[in-house]
Image: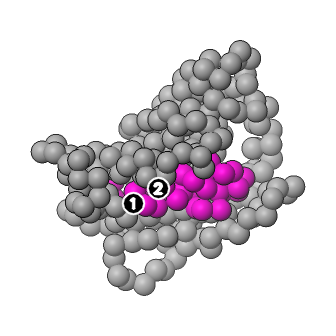
Amino acid sequence: MLRMMCITAHPDDEAGSFGGTLRLYHDRGVETCVVCLTPGQAATHRGGAKNDQELAVMRRREFTAACEILKVTRGIVLDYPDGQLHRQELYKIVSDLTFQIRQFQPQVVITFGPEGGLTGHIDHSMTGIAAMLAFQWAGRNNRFPDQLTDAIKAHRPQKLYFATANFTLPGRQPIALAPATAFIEIGKYFETKIVAFKAHATQASLWPLFESNIRGRGTQEMFHLAAQTSTNPASQETDLFAGIQEDL
């Protein structure tokens, strides 16, 4: 079975940065999993929540709704503090992500690059760094050996991609995006991506900005191939599963 894991920082990342790709690959028969490190409880936009705990509950519900729209097989929200991933123990985050990879056994992992995606958010940066380490370590039986049981085995994903783009957002701190090596045509799923983003009702103030930034820029989601188990030279791709061996 082909499987893809998307590792994000906040509820709404799964739709805004990866939504079209997640829905497209579901319809191609790929099992998908989204692991979100925080429940987004420190968001500027509060949706009427009286405190962080209430907002976390609301955003978990919105994440579930968005995952249903995107037909995500498994959606997981961990409990790390929003806006504070850079203050957490990186080794612990990597351990948690390594466990998720070993449990789900994806061939492909998609996440943010160390620049933090288009927004440059520090949580996005730390998520990408932790995901990169987990990608490398999940297949090594000398990394977190206490996780390994009869049911949980070391698992080596075959490809790691960072989300990227051919534009940057105005008025933001500077970022240097990785060059695109994969161009995924999401076509009819473009509108589904927007609907999934709007499932995050607490973030309604961001809906116009989100739409204005992506409409008119084409119907592609772009990725940078950051690592692969194959030693073949990288080439421009239109399929994240190109070259994947299902029996590994």
- Residue 50, by quadrant, is top right
What amino acid type should be assigned to the residue bearing mark 1? Phe
Check the image and name the residue furthest to the right: 171
Residue on which disc 1 sits: 135
Q: How many marks?
A: 2
Magenta-highlighted residues: 106-135
- Secondary element under disc 2, as helix, strand or loop, is helix
Horizontal and vertical percent for residue 111? 52, 55
Q: Label 1 to label 2, Cα distance in Å?
A: 6 Å
Horizontal and vertical percent for residue 146? 23, 47
Kindly identify the residue that appears in the image at 62 percent across and 73 percent down.
179
Location of residue 20 with respect to 207 vertically, above or below: below
- Which one is in front, 37 or 90? 90
Q: Residues within 10 Å of mark 2 (few under 14, many from 20)?
A: many
Kindly identify the residue that appears in the image at 70 percent across and 33 percent down.
43
- Work out whether residue 184 can be spotted: no
Whether residue 189 is in magenta: the answer is: no
Horizontal and vertical percent for residue 158? 34, 65
Kindly identify the residue that appears in the image at 70 percent across and 55 percent down.
120
Location of residue 19 with respect to 115 vertically, above or below: above
- Which one is in front, 25 or 188? 25
Kindly identify the residue that appears in the image at 54 percent across and 57 percent down.
128
Residue on which disc 2 sits: 131
Callouts 1 and 2 close, C-beta under 8 Å: yes
